[in-house]
Amino acid sequence: MPLHHPNENLLTEFASGTLPIAQAVAVKTHLHFCSECRQSVQKMESFGGALLEKLEPQPTPLDSFDNLMNSIEASSKNVAQTSEAIASPRHSLNNNLNNKTLPKLIQKLINNEPLQWKKINRTLQTAPLTVGQNQYQVSLQRIEAGDSAPEHDHRGVEITVVLEGSFSDTKGIYQEGDFLVKEPGDIHQPISARNQHCLCLSVEEAPVKLTGIWGKLLNPFIRLNAA
Amino acid sequence: MATAAPIRESNTFKIVEDKPANLRAISDNTQTMQLSSSKKTPTAVWNAYLVDVGRSQDRKSFKALFEHFGPLLKSYFMSKFPSQHSLQMMDELVQEVMIKVWQKAQTYDPVKAAASTWIFTLARNTRIDMLRRGNKYANTTSIETEEVWEDSTENGPYSILKHDRDSDQIQSALQLLPEEQALVIRKVYMEAKSHSEVAEELRLPLGTVKSRVRLAQNKLQSLLRR
C-alpha cells in the first residue's frame, strides 16, 4: 500500500471531474495501487450523487422521453462497438518495459504510439506520452539501478507516480504507487534503489514560455543545476 | 402476487443489506423483489428501478428514472455551461446521459453505489467528454474518458460502508452543513469548478476554499457515522 497519496483537495477535483486530464491520469494511476484512495473517491462520488438529488429540477420538453427511446432504438440497430480497456499491443518492442504488471491505463498510453526514449544523461531517460492536451508534459521517466538522476528543480508543478522500483531523496523513500507533488523551487535529486531501476510517470506543467514550441524541443524541460 | 425472489447475486459476492427495504420493481414481466422490513427509502426505490432496467430493459422503470433524474441532470448541465449554449444542447446532454444509463444498466450494482451516485458519474463523464471534444489535441490520443474516470461501480468488490452509499442519509447530512461549506461543495461538484475557480468567483483565498471543502467533507463523514 502506498504511503504517499494525492491530498484530499486533489482527489475531490478528480471525483468532481474538474482536474485536467493529465493530472487525472496521474491520480488514476495512483488509484490502481491504493484501495484507500479508491474508497475516498467512491465516497466523494456519493456526495456528488446526493448533491445531484438536491438540485432544483429544470423541466424537460414534453416529448423528450419519446425522443430518447427513438434514439436508443436507432443506436441499437448500429453495430455494437465495444471499447477495449487494454489496447492490443501495437508497439510491443518498447524496450525494457514489463507491460503486463503496469496499470491498464499506462499500458494503453505506452501502446498508443512507439515510445521515444530520450537519454537526458547517463542515468535518466524519458519518453513522452500523449493524453490529448498541451498544458502538461506527460512522460515516463526511468532511472537505472543505483543511479541518481540529475539534481533539478521544477519550472512548474510536477506530479510523479512510481510505477516500478523505488527512489529516495532527502525527504523520503518512494515506492510503487507513491504519489508525489513537487512545486517550483523544490530542488531534489532522486536516487533509485540499488538493485532495481526506477520507472515513474511524470506529469509536469509545461512552462508557459515553452508551450508553443515544446514539441519541437530536443532538450528536456528540466533544468540541470551546474555541478 | 408477490413471491419472495432471491436477491440478485453478482459474480463476486451476495448483496447483503443490514436494513433491507421493501422494494417493488414496476415491470410487466419481472418478479417482485421483496426483502424484509417495511421502509421504502427513495434511494432504494431508484436503485431498484435501475436494477430493473439492467436486468430486463424495463421501460416503465426507465421512464420513472428519466422523469426523476432528467430534470436534475438538466440542472447539472445548465449550471456549468455558459448561457450562450442553448437549452436544446442541455436537453441533448441529458439524453446522452440517459442513453448511457440504458446501455450500461447491466453493470450497475446497488451494493457498490446508489443510483444517484452512478448517474452522477455518468453525467460527470459526459461533461468531461464534451470538454475534450472541444480540445484540438483530443484526437491525438486513444484514451477514453471512462478509462480515466470510471463509472462508480467498476471498482471491483465494494469497499465503502453502506451508510456512505446511502444517498438519503447523505442528503440529510448536507442539510446540516454550515451554508459557507454547503456553497463550496455545491460549486465544486455540481458546477464542476476547480478550487481556484471557486476562489476567484467568491473572492476568497484559495487556501480558504480548500479548507472549507475539507471541513465540509469531514463533517459529512462524521454525520454519516452517527
Image (cartoon, rainbow, N blue to C red):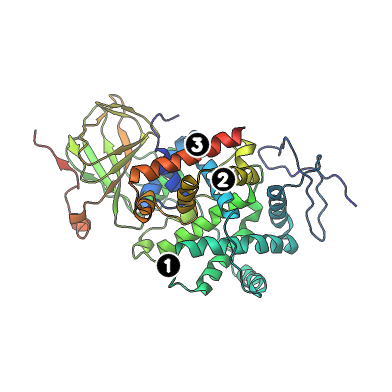
> Secondary structure under badge 2?
helix
Per the image, the residue denoted by label 1 is B82
Label 3 neighbourhood size at 10 Å, few (<14), some (14-19), many (20+)?
few
Q: Determine the chain carrying the residue at label 2.
A: B
CB contact under 8 Å: marks 3 and 1: no
Residue A182 seen by the camera: yes
Residue that sits furthest to the top in the current view: A194
The picture places residue A102, in percent across and down from the top left corner, at 42, 40
Q: Hey, what amino acid is under mark 3?
A: Asn
Q: Earlier in the sequence, mark 3 or mark 1?
A: 1
Task: Give coordinates of residue B27: x percent, y percent.
Answer: 79, 59
> What residue is shown with label 3?
B218
Identify the subunit bearing mark 1.
B
Specify the amino acid type for callout 2: Leu
Disc 3 and disc 1: Cα gap in Å?
31 Å
Marks 2,1: beta carbons within 8 A: no
Alpha carbons under labels 3 and 2: distance apart: 12 Å
Using the image as rendered, state which of residue A212 and residue B160 is in the foreground.
Answer: B160
Decide if residue B153 is on the left or right side of residue A36: right
Residue B195 falls left or right of residue B104: left
